[in-house]
Image: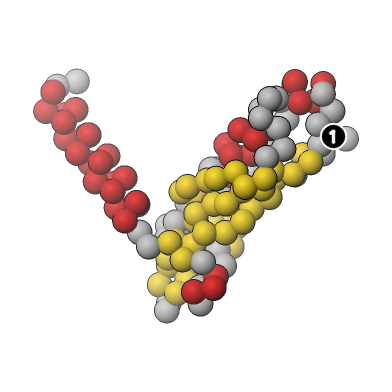
Amino acid sequence: MSRQLLTAFALVLATTVASVAAQEIFTTKDGVSLPVPVRSVKPGYTAAAMDAHIEGTVGLDIVVLADGRVGDVMITQSLDKEYGLDTQAVEAARQWLFKPGMKDGQPVAVRVALEMTFTLK
């Protein structure tokens, strides 16, 4: 790949990241409607977590962007750092898609809580 093409790609990527970071993030306290999930992904169990019989919930704080994709994901309640369930929950959350929250008739980025529950059958 040419140096010019790589430079152009890096510039586009940096501009995209900056525009996402520049979005104002609202909460429902700001008179914003909640985002509505249109695609959810269940987290997978790791073999080690299954062998250890770990069950419970990972609490997440996510930002649903104005285009419905998930931006920032932060763990607010850890279930398991040793066997990988926290990581599985974050990876699953990043794959969700939402009808975005609305403020004054416009889609906006909204911070919401999300829980991922792990249950052995």
Residue 82 in the figure: left or right of residue 74: right
Please tell me how many numbered marks the rendered image carries.
Answer: 1
Task: Pick out the residue farthest to the left.
Answer: 4
Residue 13 in the figure: left or right of residue 73: left
Q: Position of residue 75 (x, y in %)?
A: 60, 43
Circle 1 Cα neighbour tier, 10 Å, few/some/many (<14 / 14–19 / ≥20)? few
Disc 1, SS = loop
Residue 55: tell me if it is visible: yes
Q: Is residue 121 above or below residue 2?
A: below
Q: Is residue 74 above or below residue 86?
A: below
Task: Pick out the residue farthest to the right.
Answer: 121
Q: Residue at x 72, y 38 (%)?
A: 79
Residue 97: tell me if it is visible: no
Q: Residue at x 24, y 46 (%)?
A: 15
- According to the picture, the residue beneath numbered tag 1 turns out to be 120
Q: Position of residue 67 (x, y in %)?
A: 42, 57
Pick whichever, 7 or 62, lies toward us.
62
Q: Is residue 108 above or below residue 31?
A: above
Image quadrant in which you'd find residue 120: top right
Residue 74 in the figure: left or right of residue 119: left
Image quadrant in which you'd find residue 5: top left
Under mark 1, the amino acid is Leu
Q: Position of residue 54 (x, y in %)?
A: 81, 31
Q: Residue at x 25, y 41 (%)?
A: 14
Q: How is the image coloured?
A: secondary structure
Q: Residue at x 51, y 77 (%)?
A: 31
Which quadrant is home to the C terminus?
A: top right
Which quadrant is home to the N terminus?
A: top left
